[in-house]
Image (tube, rainbow, N blue to C red):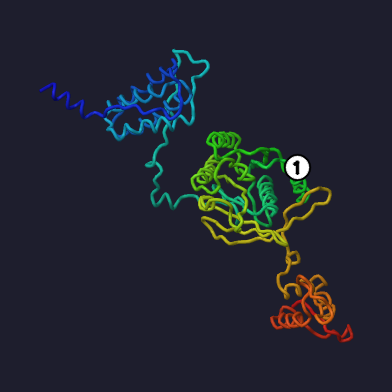
Amino acid sequence: MTRSFLAAIGADKPQRTTPPAPAKTTETTTPYGRAVLDNHVPRMRSTPEGIRNDTLRDIGRLLGGFVGGGEITWNDAHDQLWDAAVDSGLDESEVNRISDHLEYGMKEPLAAPNDWTPDKPVHAVPDRPTGLRSKILSRSQLRNLPKPQPLIDGLLTQGTTALLYGKWGSGKSFISLDWACCLATGKAWQTHTVKQRRVLYVAAEGVFGYQARVEAWEKGWDTSVSDEWMSFYPEPVNVSLEHHVTELCEFVAEEGFDVIVLDTLARCTTGADENSSKDIGLVVDALARLRDATPGRLGLALGIHHEGKNGSLRGSTAYEGGVDTVFNVQKGSVIKLVNTKQKDARDGDAWLLKLAPIMGTSSCIIDRAHAADVEPTSCIGWILRTVREHGGVMLQEDLLDCLGYDRRTDEKPAENPPYEIAVLRRKLGQAANEKRVIIAADPTRDGKLVVKLA
């Protein structure tokens, strides 16, 4: 009876089979590795029900780190933890995840401290997150959450991730640097109030040219950017690689940067597949981690990216879907900045901008564009612009000379303007009917017709 009872117990226990290591690992466990096993594996046996799976995961990942670092063999880590997990009462489906936990830990190899001796303690299991329960919000707590505060009022908000994209040569880097300098100084951006914040600008395409741009910005706006508030990193940081993200996050947290700009994301994601939602999902997650590394998690991670052939943001839709704010830069006769996504506010706002050269420097600044800077796209648009350029009033015959041609005597031009005289007269009459201009005889000009802006 006793023998059959014990046999039945043994039959109910999961039978251990050691899977092959996912990669070549050490063949011998070191003294430090043995101390790690002796210190942590027995805890698995005494873990109370309810937290056994969490404990198995945490110890498994820790041991995996030492497998990856060459301190513990794969078989020692797997088999000892398996036996302890079975003894604790976990079933087969649960202990079968040990190899997953070990593989996860191997991604971040751990090694013995150089000064370790057997009388010193070994690595501890890292503290676990407090868990879902502590993060649950009641209705009252939700109501009392602080409202998001702007960094640049109407454009960029605290505690967010953002993208700014456009074609090469569209001016997107000028805009991102303009934003960065405004944030580093607290200077208003195109009349929008700005909160002063510490900025880290990752110039991933090289820092060459930024000195001239910052010098032009300082001279153009008569505002100095101090070392305390703005720093540049002159090389790419690959945010598709875990150890690069971790190191950058640690640096941001240690130095207290509030705003991190990655210019461009293409240079900061070398090796990632832009069209893969999985790869880009990791990049978006890296932006969120950078934001969370800022003081109070109230900063901003801003990525600068390229436009695709169809005019949309290049690569996977996971980019736009995963961030809070998106801006598109469109280049024509002026630069048009369009807010295409604003997660928790109105989007669709647009700003007309231009590059304004600064005397005494070799670069430009971003400035507001005016109606006179906009290249007209219609005949009436050209009429209004031409009259405006002549002080708001001009002789009708001079206007026709400026913008018209006679198809009976002149060769048809390749582009407009000029417009055929008959068309120009008709559009001028339309502008008058729409009360955009006034056409009247001017007694001071021998009664000739003049065109005035209404």
Q: Nearer the viewer, residue 421 or 190?
A: 421
Q: Nearer the viewer, residue 398 or 315?
A: 315
Residue type of the residue flagged with mark 1: Gln
Q: Is residue 305 left or right of residue 446?
A: left
Q: Nearer the viewer, residue 88 or 180?
A: 88
* Residue 228 position (above or below residue 123): below
Residue highlighted by disc 1: 211
Q: Quadrant of residue 61?
A: top left
Regarding residue 294, the answer to whether it shows in the image is no
* Residue 353 position (above or below residue 280): below
Q: Could you tell me which quadrant the C terminus lies in?
A: bottom right
Q: Could you tell me which quadrant the N terminus lies in?
A: top left
Q: Is residue 347 left or right of residue 169?
A: left
* Residue 445 position (above or below residue 70): below
Q: Provide the secondary structure element on which disc 1 rests.
A: helix
> Residue sitting at 49 percent across and 45 percent down?
278
Q: Is residue 139 left or right of residue 187?
A: left
Q: Is residue 361 left or right of residue 62?
A: right
